[in-house]
Structures are given as structure tokens and as C-alpha cells.
Amino acid sequence: MERSIYAESFALDVTAKDRLDTRRKIKYESELDKTFSNRIAESAHGEQLFGCIQCGTCSAACPVSHYMDYTPRKIIQMVREGFKEEVLKSSTVWLCASCYACTVECPKGIKITDVMYALKREAISGNYYPKNAPASILANNFFKQVLNNGRNSEGPLLMKMYLKTNPFMLLKNMMLGIKLFTRGRISMKTEKIRDKKALKKLLNSVESKKKILSAGKPADVKEAAV
Amino acid sequence: MKYIYYPGCSLKSTGRVYEESLLSVMDVLNIDYKELDDWNCCGATAYMAVDDRKAYVLAARNLALAEEQMKNEPEVNIIAPCAACFMVLLKTQKFLEENPEDKAAVVAALKESGLNYTGRAKVRHPLDVLVNDYGEAEIIKRITKPLKGIRVASYYGCQTVRPYSVFDDQRNPETMDRLMKAAGAEVVDWSMKTRCCGASLTGTVQDVALPLSYVIVHEAKKRRADAVATACPLCQFNLECYQTDMNSKFKSDLKIDVLYFTQLLGIALGIEPKKLGMNRLFTEPENLYKILEGGNRVYV
Amino acid sequence: MPEKNIKSNYEPKIVAFFCNWCTYTAADLAGVSRLKYAPNVRVIRIMCSGRVDPQFILQAFASGADGVLIGGCHPGDCHYAEGNYKMLRRFRLLKRMLKDLGIADERLRLEWISASEGEKVKLVINEMVEQVKALGPLAIPQHLKNINEELKHFPGEEIREEEMAHA
Amino acid sequence: MSENNIKMNGNGTHKSAGTPKIGFYVCHCGHNIASQVDVEDVQKFAAGLPGVTISRDYKYMCSDPGQELIQKDIKELGLNRIVVASCSPLLHEHTFRKAAEKAGLNPYFFHMVNIRENVSWVHDNRESATKKAKDLTRAAIQRVFFHKPLEKKSVPINPDVLIVGGGIAGITAALTIANAGKHVYLVEREPTIGGHMAMFDKTFPTLDCAACILTPKMSSVKAHPNITLWTYSEVEKVEGFVGNYKVQVKRKPRYVIEELCVGCMECIDACIYKEAKYPDEFNQKLSKRKPIYIPFPQATPQVVLFDPETCIDFKSHRCKKTCIESCDRKAIDLKQVPEYKDINVGTVILSTGFKTYNAELSPQYGYGKYPNVYTSLEIERLVNASGPTSGEIVTRDGIKPKSVGIIHCVGSRDQKAHKWCSKVCCMYSLKLAHLIKEHTDAEVYNFYIDMRTPGKGYEEFYDKLMTEGVHFVRGRVAEVSDWALVPEEENKLTIRVEDTMVGMVRRIPVDMVVLAVGLEPREDAGDMRRLFNISCSNEGWFLERHPKLAPVNTFTDGIFIAGACQGPKDIPDSVAQAGAAAAEVLSLISAGSIELEPNTAFITEDNCSGCKSCIPICPYTAISYNEGTKKAYINEALCKGCGTCVAACPSGSITQNLFDDEEIFSEIDGLLKFAGIELEETEAEHA
């Protein structure tokens, strides 16, 4: 069994190989969004996040935290202090597989997974999400498909997602697709429920009251001066 | 007791094996159930990421439908086999209970489309129904081909046991272990029971999710398990269908049968493999059959 | 008691009997922890909730209280072993009697509050003030006054002055 | 109740108080009251009330100038009633009563109005707070009319003292009191005194050997003529009140006569069990003991005892009883039965100590599942020379660990376990890190959230540890697991933690994990509380009268608490509290008697109809029936002044000093003046 049974365990981000990374790493208070913490806390029903003692249990419990640019603990602190851009542009939000390990282990009872969901919603409604990030594309397509048909059809959904994000993946998973198809475990038929229109009306009649972010379009958020 | 069965989208496609095996097991144990008519998708992780109010009303519609279709039953018990559906329905109920303002909005919306949500429905997982309602003793009585000699590693995944489910311990669950013991199998003691398999990440960011699934099957193999028993379509899919990708990425030659606990239980109850969806698995579980006929393992 | 349309700035007056060892200490703790609650409650300190004589409660209502709150130690915690049990017995009988007098149930309340439950003092007081405010004023002295007025014009009936002064 | 013809009915034995001349004083208490209550307005309002001769407001009434103000007014204006509106009577009623007494006025002509804890601190609307203060003032002024001059009741204090719990706190208090020449009963539930401290090897921060500083004290307790030491005994019943408690102590049978046994331990060797078979509780079940055993070598008293559950003679009565033959002093008596001792004491000190958190309730750390996960108490025994491995730190499968991980805050600072910080775990974890490093030279890791070293010499101890090469990783461990990702994690326990200072998750393989378990109240704290009539905090610790100013007193006079039973604390604090409790006890004993509030009840004979309904009501059986006069009468010495009989007397013939019916009726009337006239809220009389 080779050194590590899977990917390199330690990789510092040493992108700027040829020169020192002298990008300014300071954030002025005026650049922070002071309302961000209350908005997230209210949207996630997670007022307890203000009680976080930064102990790091969530990052240690999280199965994918070592792939994230900011560990869940850092995200909670950044949400609390208003680092809106860094949080909404981070990979953490989209790597979270909502397995709830952090929510169960947190000694202060903070619903961290619900905070991550609230951040996903903020990222999507403020279209901060990285353009070709598959997770957010999957979420949006899934949402539209169920909105129209009432059920999700895995075949068409995956097809559309791969086409939109990375067609090469389509080829790579072709073998897998055929195996599933021949075993009747995937089909290209779109599943539907009987009264689709009633469901659509039902879904549209309810609005998440947290829609005020549409005002903060990314366009008018000035890029952090380098 | 009468149950209402909520399959969820994946049990009609990638998870068809889970539905086939579960329904045949319930038929043999003559558990009285009927499928929820015109059920809709529970929204899984996607809806919550787009709009939480819509996510709750989408899931609540199923609960309202179940309450409607089981009007004259003393209790409304919904069996939701898929971990994501099970967790989302439970979360919806709990959330609406704790937030009267949201509940009012959801109930009003549902009323417009002629449905009424009271919160009477109880969301149940098949493990809970088989072990706590039906009881191991009853199952043992009906075992015809005990899985003697088969070492099973029971894998619960994440959302089946946490954070809202209360039928088992969140960190060290044992309902599936008890069920496998009842089916005559030998149960492997390991600490990966509730570790996340990577869920939807295998589709979106595979290089992050693959190691998660690999670690689980690797540990099961190391503990000399013959089969991993799962209780969620996404876990079963990740652990079984990506074994070839894992072997190429981590330069290993690992091969292990990954089945649903309902399939293993089905075999022990003497149900013929075809009705348990055995033919739909990527690899025929030869090890399993060899051991049952008293032979020795084909691959270790 | 017909429901009157309650004046918007109506502030109910509530008399409270707090036992010295548990509830009065809890109220002090609420003060030390600066917990904020409605100012409508006036506290009378007694050594034990067993000391509260049903006459005190009736006199409070008769003198114009809109509600009476009694605070005692949890059963088993009483500094004098059984005072709170005796109070519970009297409380049950008195509740039935008040119902006959047409005084709403929420106007008399008994709560077990231990020395460390400052938070509970705040919650109970705030909740009771809201409930009594919703019921509106009891205003028994006003009714007594009205009755005395009517009796005055009753031909031939001679009312002694002192009784009038008592109201 | 019209004001002018107030009857002044005392109980007839005092000089007539004449018409009331009331002095009213409202206190600013700096800003505490003045910020929310318009004190001038209250002062003016009181001046207009009938019977008020002088009404003043002052910045600090409880200060000496404040009190002198009252005394000057009493002398010059001949005041015969005083009302002070300031803080809670529980705080300063005593102060003002003394001031009035010094000026020649009977202290019980004084009444206090609580406008700080009940008004200014809890209301943020200044106008309604002032209105409430005025109502309370009017009630007090009407009440003080009916106050009667009373003499303090004094009760003799029995000089004997009961101390429950023989840990370091109990031992210190017992020695201090015994050295002062007073007799002490020290009752300990375990077969030996010494408590948790006897289990430790070293103590922080000085690394003193626990046994070296404890055993001399234990033996001086055993040898002290003034201390009656009852180990393996529990308190069964407690009656009475400060100054004379009647206590019943149950002495559990040791099946060995204490006076005869000298602890030669011949009988243990002679026991038919050739080797030890049963888990040794003292060694945290890490080693075995025989059915006949002694907890640890320096146990005090040095007497063996039988464990009836495991000794076969208690089950089958067919044992050869080789132990009895081996004892030439004939100290063994298997027929012993529990003995009940009744004693009278004046004061009680509770020093029952703490319990450690059960680590199995945090399954993520694998205690009970993985053999090489230990609690800190188990490590204390391992590292101790008289412990199961005589000081050798080895894992359960006998190998010397090359790497050890110490996890802080197990069961503490956790919503699912205990919210509080247990105060001692950081320091004892540092000590254990040092000892483990010293004994095994292993790689030692401490996983902490905040390193709390608040005492004298504590931070220096932490510095010493850092220079000794112990790894300090700031992060709370999420999981201890046995599956390996890389070869060096094979058959080791892997600790998964985020090193929050580096901001990365680490997987650290170790051979042994030590859980720094927190402190929690003992399970039977609830029963002890009911036994001694004291109260507990929400978490279950014994409740002190005041967290800062009276930490060793309880709300019950005569009962004091010391040590960890009042909250998590280390040895220096426990010893300090033991000294404080001893001082409180000695001050009561040397005073010889204690003055009690004269709020007892008494029966006016001619009203009493002899209906006897009050007799069963009194919990202290202070009321009895006089067959001769066919009347009930109250024994003033037994009456505790709860007033329950006063409220129950159908003919109202029982009156109570300080809380008389008239006083309370006047208070009710004062509070509700002009209330209930719901339409026109007149304040006519307000001058």
C-alpha cells in the first residue's frame, strides 16, 4: 500500500512560484458587511452561531474539510464578522455534502449545516457561485426540473449538468452510464407527477422572505483593491 | 399496523434495487403497505440550497398527501427508505413545529391546493420498522436460509441516523447489525458506520468524493468483510459503482460486494435473487453465493 | 364580569407574596442579573408561602388588585419542610371559591420558584402581566362604590357613613 | 382603615409607643437606584404621608454618614419608627436595625423597602419604576405603624460539630476545629478518609507528592482526641435547627472490629482466594483485590474490611474462614450488623466533594470501546507508585506508549454534557503531561480550547511544560478512531483535530489517549440537599448564600459547605474554604448562642377556642394542647416563625411577630391605594 492510500495529504497553496506572494492581506472594516451575520443567522435559524468558541470540532468532524479553502470554523468566524465576499466565493459552501456530522458534534449546539445551506442560498441569489462549479449548477437544474415535473429524473439531470459544466466528464462516465442503463438503473425518461400545474402554483405561492439580497448584485460590489 | 410507502425519486432509478428488495421483503413478512399516490420529490439537498420556504412546502405536500390518504387510520406511518427523503421529511416536520410563522405560511399554501397539513404523520425508516415494530424474534422465525459464514459490515451513512432521526444512536447505531445477526450473518465491528460516503459530491467534485468512498470500502475489506450492507441509494451507488475508478486512482485491486440490507435479509428469507434485484448489481455477488453453498471465497 | 373594551394604556396592578428563602431570593437574583420585566407587580415578603392567609388574597382583590401571584419553594425544598404543601391545599380551595365570585382563573397564580431561578421570576411575571392585561381591570372598589351609590338612593334604607369610608 | 385612630396594640409588656413619628430615608445607592427611580420625587411623596415626621434622600444610606443621619434624627426629632427605601432586606436590614438600636430605638421599629433589586435594576421605564417605588414606600410607612418592640431570641449553640465528607476539605476543617478544642464528628462514606486527593500522585503546580502532604494530616485526624472518626458511615436523619441538630449516623458493618485490628493484613494473605479476583474501586478498576481488602496502604483508619457481595462465606456460609484463624487479635466478626448512632451537634460542615464525568457519555472518544483510552483519574493511579502498575505507565496490553494524547474539556464546555468549565482539568492535564513525559519520554500532545492557568505559579508551570517539548495543539478533538489512512496509523488510535492556530485538520496517531474528564456534582447531591434542608444550584452544586460575600454559608443558619461540593475547584481553594467554614463554625461556638429573628408566633389565650386545628400543621411540633386550660400554646424555643399556623387558625388567635396580620393587611392597603378605581386614576392625596 503506497505512502498514503489517497491524494497528497499536505499541499500549501504555493501558486506564485517565481515571486513572493505580496498580495495585500488586510481587510478594512469599511469593506465588511456588518449586516451579513444577522442575515445568515436569521435565515438559518441559527442565532447560536454567535456563541461559537472557535474550538474547531466542526472542522475535525467534517469528512471533506481538508479540501476546503476555509475550514467550517473559519467560515463561522468570517460570517460573524461580515467577510461576505470571501465566504460566498469559498469552496467550503459547495463542498459541504450536508452529512450533519458538524451539527451533531458542535459543543455549542450551532446548526452549522443549516448555516451552510443559508450560505448556499445567499451565494445563489447573489449569484456569487463560481461559474462552472458543478454543485450549484446541479442545485439549480434539480430545482427547475422538480418545479416543472414534480419529480427529478437522474438521467436527464446528469446529462444537462455535465454538458453545462464539463463535457469531458460525460465521456469519462460513459462506461458507467451504459452499465447502469443496461441494468435498468437509469433511464432518459423524465418522471412526472399527475397535477404538475398545481405543484408549480403551490411552489410559486411561497417565497423565502430572505430575498432582500437581490439588491446587493455582485456588479456593484467593488472588487477588493489589490 | 398499516404503512404508507414513500419511494422517492432515486428508488425509481439508480436505487431500484432497494425498492425491489424492500417490497419483496415486506411482502414475505406480510407487512401491510401501499405506495403514496402522486408523491412528489422531497427536494433533497438541492431545494434547501435554493429557497428554504419552497423546500419545506415541497416536502410538506407529501406529508399532507399521506395524512389525506391515511385519513381513517389511527396512525399515519410513512416508510421513507432513502436517507435523504427520510431526513428531509423529518427536518420539515421539526422545522414547522418550531417555527409557527413558517408553518402558517406552508399550511395556507397547501390549503389553496386542497391539502391540509397537521403534522400528524410519523416518518419511519425501514430499519426502525423492521427492528422496532416487527421485531427481530419474528424475523428469526421466518429465516429459511441463514447467512451462515457471511461477514457483513453494516454501513448506515449519515442522514439515516442524524441529525433528526431518533430510532437509533447517532454515533454508534446498531439496528442494522441486529437485523443482520437475526439473518444469521456475522457482523463486523468497525468505526466507519456513520462516516459520510461523499453523497452527491461524486457527481460534482469526484476527486474529493472518491477518497471518502474508497476509505470506507478499504476499511471494510481490511476487516475481512464479505459484503457491505447499506440503507441509502446514494451510499450504495458510491460504494459499488465507483470501485473500478477507485482501483485505477489508488492503484489497488479491491473488490467487495455492496448490497442493500434488504437484499441480504431477502436472501435469508429465501426470496429468489431475481426478485431482490440481484441481477441489477454491477458484480454478481459470487462470494455470497459460494459461501452460502458452503464453498470458499472467490475473491478476498 | 362582562369584557369591557380595555383602555389602551391600562396597566394591571398585581400583588405578589414571595417566600423569603426561595422566591424572594430568586427575585433578588433577577435584580443582580439585571433581567428586565414588567413593573406591574408589587412584592410583599413573608417567611414562608404557608404564611399566606386566604384573607390576604381576598383583601388584595377587594382593595383593587387585578391579580395576585404567590411564589413558594418547590415541593420538598421548603425551609420549614411543609409550608408550601399547606399553601397548595389552601390555593386549590380558594381557586374554586374565586370562580364562584366570577374572578377569572388567570388572576390568581401559584408558582414554585427556587432560589437559583431568577429567569423564572421574569418569565412568570411577564406572562402573568400579559394575561391579566388581556382580561382587563377587576376594579372591585369601583363596583363597591357603584353599589353603594345605588343603595344610597334606595328609599328608606339608612347606610352608615363608616362603611362608605371603608371603600 | 381610616388613619387617625390607629390602635397601638403591642403585646402589652413594652412602654407605650405613643403616636408614630416616622423617619423616611430613600437611598440613591450611587446610580444603582437614582438612575431609574426619581428619588427626590419619592422623598417629596413620602413627606406628605400621614405620620411621617422627616423624609430625606441620601447617596449611600448604608454608609456610616448615612446611618449617622438616622441616629441624629432619632435623637433630635424623637422618631419612633424608621423606614429606609434602598436595597434588599436580605442585604442590609441587619445594618439599619443595628444603627437604630445604637440610637436607643428598638431595632424592630424599622422596616425596609426594596427599590433596587425589585425596582431600579429590573425596570427600564423610569416613570413606572418611580410610581412602583412610591407604592412600596406608602405600603411600608403604613406597615411600620403596627410594628411592635421585640427582644432578640437567643438560642444556645451546642459546641459539637458534624463534618460530612473526609476529603482534604473535611480533614482540614476537622483539624482546625479540633485544634481549637472543640469536639468534631467526622463522617466519611468510604472505608478511608482522603477523598480524591489520596488517589493522586503529584499535585500541581508545585509537584508535591499528594501522599506526602496528605497522610500526615490523615494520621493526625485519626490520633486527635477531639475528633470522632466514623468511616464507612453515612448520615441517615437530621432534625432540629442551628445550635441544636439531632443527627442519626448509620455505621455500615466492616465485619472487622476497628479497635482490635492493627492493619497487619495477615488475614488478606490467609484468604482462601490465592490471588485477587475482584475490580479494585480505589484503583479505578485497573487492578484486582480480594473480598477482604484495604483500600490503599496508607488508608486511615488502617483497618481491613469485607466486601459482602464477593466474599463467598456471606453467600454459602461454607468457607473455611482461614482469615479468622490467621487473626491472633480476633478482630474479625462476620456477624456485625449496621449500627445507628444518634448525636447532637450545633453546626454542620458539608464537604462531600465531586464526581468525575462519565467518559462513556462522549462516545466519539471511544472510552470503553478502545482499551487504550483512559480517564485522567485512571492515569493518576497508573503514575502513582502505590498504584496498580507501581508507577509504570503502560497500556492495557502492557507496552510502554511512545505517543500519548491528552484531550481537554471532556464533558465540560459542552451543551450535550456540562455547560460549565471544570476549572482544574487544564492544570492537572499539564501535570499529567509532565509526569507521562518524565516516566515514558513519549511524544505528548495536549489538545485544548483555552489553556486556563489562573493561579499563582500556574502560568510558570505551563511555561515549564512548553520548554519540556510537550506538543500543545489548540483545537477540540472531534474523534478518536482506530482506522488507518497512512501506514504509521496502523493499530494506533488516531486523533482527528483541527489545529486552529495553523488552520488545518490533523490526524495524529497515538498509542494512548487520556481524557481530561470534568467535575460534576455527586449523584446523591439531591438527597443530601433534602436531608440538610439546603438548596442546590440548577446544575446540582450546593448553593451558597452569596457567591462572592458568603461562599461557605448556606441559606440555612448553622450549615456550612466547603470544597468541590459547592462547585469545581482545586485543592488550594478547597483548603481555603475549609478554613473559612471552620472559622464560621468556631465564631458561632465561641459566641455560645445565636440571636434568632424574633418572628415566632404566639397564641392570645382568650381568643383560642381549643379546636386543635393548628397542632398537626406545625412541622416542628412546637404547638401543644393544654388539657387544663383547653387551649393550645406555642413553645417559643421550638417555633421557627414560618407562620403557617397563623394563617391556618380559624379564630385568628395566633399572631406572629414581625409578620402580623395587621402589618400585612396595612401593607396590602398601602400598595393598592387608589387602585381599582379604573376610570379616573386620581392621585388626589398625592401632596
Image: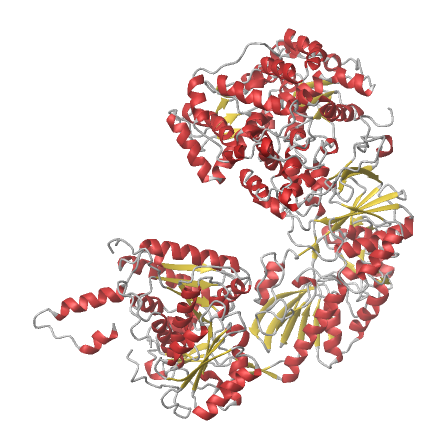
**Location of residue D134 by image quarter:** bottom left
Residue B76 horizontal side relative to residue D5, left or right: right
Quadrant of image for the C terminus of chain D: bottom left
Q: Residue at coordinates 25% horizontally, 74% vertically from top-left?
A: C166
Q: Nearer the viewer, residue D144 or D370?
A: D144
User: What colouring method underlies this structural image?
Assistant: secondary structure
Quadrant of image for the N terminus of chain D: bottom left
Do we see residue B47 in this rendering?
A: yes
Residue D603 horizontal side relative to residue C145, left or right: right
Q: Nearer the viewer, residue C72 or A62?
A: A62
Residue B243 in percent (x, y) is at: 75, 17
Decide: is D470 above or below D424. above
Residue D29 in percent (x, y) is at: 53, 73
**Location of residue B144 by image quarter:** top right
Residue A128 in percent (x, y) is at: 62, 30
Do we see residue B165 in this rendering?
A: no
Q: Nearer the viewer, residue C80 or A28?
A: A28
Decide: is A142 above or below D424. above
| Number of numbered discs | 0
Q: Nearer the viewer, residue B217 or D353?
A: B217
